């Protein structure tokens, strides 16, 4: 299952992504927000990341105006490897090399068509499992207390 969250700046984009996930038959948990009324992005980043930490969801997607705020907030949480992606190549490589478990997007930075392509790349690309990438992720866990 995929945990979804956004602030007011990402609300419209999240509606597009939810529709796309529905069309693909992918399950998700909507952690909010639920309107374009101004809210604080750390609250929704935490909600999504908690779903991953507790094992309810395997991956998450967070959206704010730029994608930066939710990325910073998510990466403060133990066990989270969030990546802000604005292109498909980065989405592919962050899965293959970093085993990223949260994708962050800028709802005011990229358009919906590109956002869906990035989302698909992130969701459909597996971690490579290569030794060098495993070693680097283990160092993240060791150095930063994952």
Image (cartoon, grey):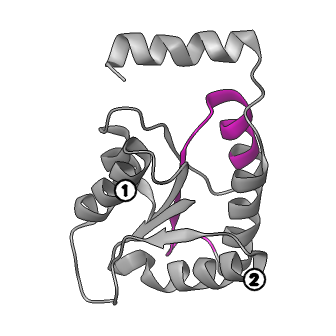
Q: Are marks 1 and 2 in contact (CB under 8 Å)?
A: no
Please identify the quadrant where the N terminus is shown: bottom right
**Neighbours of disc 1 within 10 Å: few (<14), some (14-19), many (20+):** many
Q: Is 79 placed left or right of 137 in the picture?
A: left
User: Is residue 30 among the parts visible in the rendering?
Assistant: yes
Q: Which residue is mark 2?
A: 23
Determine whether 88 is above or below 144 in the image.
below
Q: Mark 2 or mark 1, which is nearer the start of the sequence?
A: 2
Residue at point 68%, 39% (across, down): 95
**Snapshot quadrant of residue 10:** bottom left
Q: Quadrant of the C terminus?
A: top left
- Position of 106 with respect to 97 (left or right) is left
Of the pair 77 and 23, the residue shown nearer to us: 23
Residue at the location (37% across, 50% down)? 49
Q: Nearer the viewer, residue 36 or 126?
A: 126
Instruction: Report the span colored magenta.
Output: 91-110
- What is the x, y in percent for residue 114? 72, 70
| Above or below, 90 relative to 133 | below
Q: Which residue is mark 1?
A: 70
């Amino acid at each position: 299952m995929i945990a979804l969250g956004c602030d007011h700046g990402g609300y419209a984009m999240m509606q597009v992504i939810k529709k796309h996930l529905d069309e693909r038959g992918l399950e998700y948990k909507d952690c909010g927000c639920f309107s374009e009324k101004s809210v604080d992005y750390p609250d929704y980043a935490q909600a999504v990341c908690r779903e991953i930490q507790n094992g309810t969801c395997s991956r998450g997607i967070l959206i704010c105006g730029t994608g930066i705020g939710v990325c910073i907030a998510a990466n403060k949480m133990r066990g989270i490897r969030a990546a802000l992606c604005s292109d498909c190549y980065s989405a592919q490589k962050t899965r293959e090399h970093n085993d990223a478990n949260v994708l962050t997007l800028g709802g005011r930075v990229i358009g919906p068509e590109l956002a869906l392509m990035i989302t698909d790349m992130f969701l459909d690309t597996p971690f490579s499992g290569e030794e060098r990438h495993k070693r680097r992720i283990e160092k993240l866990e060791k150095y930063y207390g994952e």
